[in-house]
């Protein structure tokens, strides 16, 4: 029971711990192009994370886009080469999924 209570205290603002970590990382790495709420920037095509197209991507697709730049190998998204860990990529995907549910 103590384990459950300890875990419960890790959940802030209704977000799972992994998504909380992703929120912090999102603010430093992603908000410039994708906006604070994921709506993207009008001048930057394909940056709306809330679009129907973006929501269709699997978690594996999103992880590839973030860590390797996806199928188009976008250098701006090759965060793996910039020191982002697999765990951090997972947390970003978890956070983006919370944005998409709002």
Image (spheres, rainbow, N blue to C red):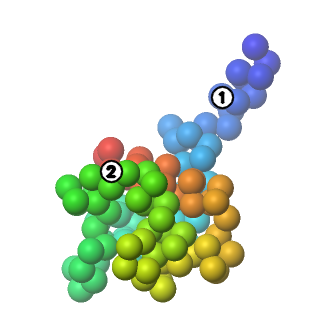
CA distance separating discs 2 and 1: 24 Å
Query: Residue at position x 43%, y 51% from top?
Result: 59
Is residue 71 in view?
Answer: yes
The image quadrant of residue 44 is bottom left
- The residue that disc 2 covers is 100
Of the pair 17 and 90, the residue shown nearer to us:
90
- The residue that disc 1 covers is 8
Query: Residue at position x 36%, y 61% from top?
Result: 37
- Quarter of the figure with the N terminus: top right
Q: Earlier in the sequence, mark 2 or mark 1?
A: 1
Query: Residue at position x 64%, y 80% from top?
Result: 82
- Would you place residue 88 above or below residue 29 in this image? above
Query: Residue at position x 48%, y 86% from top?
Result: 75
* Secondary element type, mark 2: helix
- Would you place residue 50 above or below residue 47 in this image? above
Looking at the image, residue 8 sits to the left or right of residue 26; the answer is: right
* Secondary element type, mark 1: helix
């Amino acid at each position: 029971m103590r384990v459950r209570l300890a875990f419960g205290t890790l959940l802030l603002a209704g977000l799972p711990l992994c998504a909380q970590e992703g929120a912090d990382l999102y603010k430093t790495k992603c908000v410039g192009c994708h906006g604070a709420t994921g709506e993207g920037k009008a001048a930057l095509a394909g940056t709306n994370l809330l679009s129907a197209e973006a929501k269709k991507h699997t978690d594996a697709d999103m992880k590839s886009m973030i860590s390797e730049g996806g199928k188009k190998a976008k250098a701006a998204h090759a965060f793996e080469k910039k020191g982002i860990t697999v765990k951090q990529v997972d947390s970003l995907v978890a956070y983006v999924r919370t944005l998409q549910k709002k």
